[in-house]
DNA sequence: GCGACAG
DNA sequence: ATCTTGTCGC
């Protein structure tokens, strides 16, 4: 896959914020998906040993959950972690991984927020707009907004609200486990996003897609530490 | 001024 | 995110 939009990544924090405000207008918050045959998950982790970022994309068959393809890539950090500018750190390696992908998913589940962001442009929105592909934002913790605790049962959810706007949902994917924060990335509605996350999380707190990409990332980091080329 | 702050 | 022990809550 190739991005539909390109922009510089070697920019200042102020320029990054301005870019977010500009690109945020391109986010589509309604369902505009093709039939989802393939679902992808993305994750990035930092390898202290090699001082690099490792990104992985896992592609699953949406119906069976079968793992069809995994791409991992290693890259230098180009941008520090700054709350609110997360995508400028993680997207460069993620984009390189997507460029290596031979299959084309119809939906991408991201490890990070989408609209649930100060400028309504979290990592999931950024990835979705650049590739013009439907994306869902999945956060393990909250960046902004307030919510009441959802019911204890799997599937229970409450709105995540910021400045009188619903920006996402706190969704209980497993009974007895902390909820996750789901938000629109691109070309999907919040309710459809929550449906997909639930469907993809039958056994774990996070969707299978992110679990498998996380697994791939950890394997690469482990191999790096053991000195296995 | 203080706290909060995706990974 | 990553590195870790004891500690806290259910």
Image (cartoon, coloured by chain):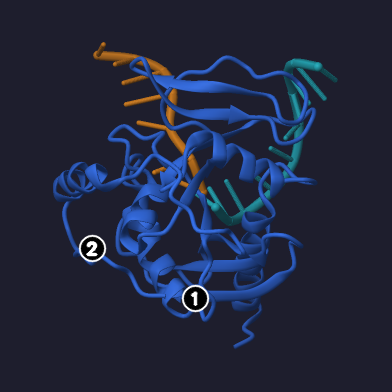
Chain colours: A blue, B orange, C cyan
User: Is A16 in front, or is A229?
Assistant: A16
Question: Can residue A140 be seen in the rendering of this structure?
Answer: no
Q: Please give the label number shown on residue A73.
A: 1
Q: Which residue is mark 2?
A: A9
Residue at image coords 28%, 35%: A119
Rendered position, A190 above or below A26: above
Residue at image coords 33%, 17%: A163
User: Is A80 in front, or is A199?
Assistant: A199
The image shows residue A148 at horizontal and vertical percentages of 57, 14
Kindly indicate the quadrant of the structure image that contains residue C3: bottom right
Toward the bottom, the furthest residue is A229
- Determine whether the residue tagged by mark 2 lies in a helix, strand or loop: loop
Image position of A173 (left or right of A225): right
Image position of A177 (left or right of A70): right
Kindly indicate the quadrant of the structure image that contains residue A118: top left
Q: Are marks 2 and 1 on the same chain?
A: yes
Q: Earlier in the sequence, mark 2 or mark 1?
A: 2
The image shows residue A194 at horizontal and vertical percentages of 59, 37
The image shows residue A75 at horizontal and vertical percentages of 41, 73
Q: Please give the label number shown on residue A197.
A: none
Residue at image coords 16%, 53%: A12
Classify the position of the N terminus of chain A by image quarter: bottom left
Alpha-carbon neighbours of circle 1 within 10 Å: few (<14), some, or many (≥20)? some
Residue at image coords 32%, 55%: A129
- Determine whether the residue tagged by mark 1 lies in a helix, strand or loop: strand
Question: Can residue A43 be seen in the rendering of this structure?
Answer: yes
């Amino acid at each position: 896959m190739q991005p539909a939009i390109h922009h510089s990544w070697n920019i200042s924090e102020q320029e990054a914020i301005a870019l977010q405000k500009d690109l945020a207008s391109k986010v589509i918050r309604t369902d505009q998906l093709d039939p989802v045959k393939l679902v992808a998950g993305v994750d990035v982790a930092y390898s202290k040993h090699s001082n690099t970022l490792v990104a992985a994309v896992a592609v699953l068959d949406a119906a069976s959950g079968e793992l069809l393809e995994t791409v991992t890539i290693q890259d230098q950090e180009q941008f520090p972690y700054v709350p609110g500018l997360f995508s400028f750190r993680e997207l460069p390696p993620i984009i390189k991984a997507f460029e290596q992908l031979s299959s084309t998913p119809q939906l991408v589940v991201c490890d990070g927020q989408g609209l649930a962001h100060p400028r309504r442009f979290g990592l999931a929105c950024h990835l979705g707009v650049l590739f013009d592909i439907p994306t869902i934002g999945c956060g393990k913790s909250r960046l902004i907004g307030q919510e009441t605790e959802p019911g204890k049962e799997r599937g229970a959810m409450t709105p995540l609200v910021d400045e009188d706007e619903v920006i996402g949902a706190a969704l209980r994917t497993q009974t007895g486990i902390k909820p996750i924060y789901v938000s629109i990335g691109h070309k999907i509605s919040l309710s459809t996003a929550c449906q997909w996350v639930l469907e993809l999380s039958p056994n774990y707190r996070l969707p299978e897609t992110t679990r498998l990409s996380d697994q791939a990332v950890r394997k690469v980091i482990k191999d790096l530490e053991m000195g296995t080329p």
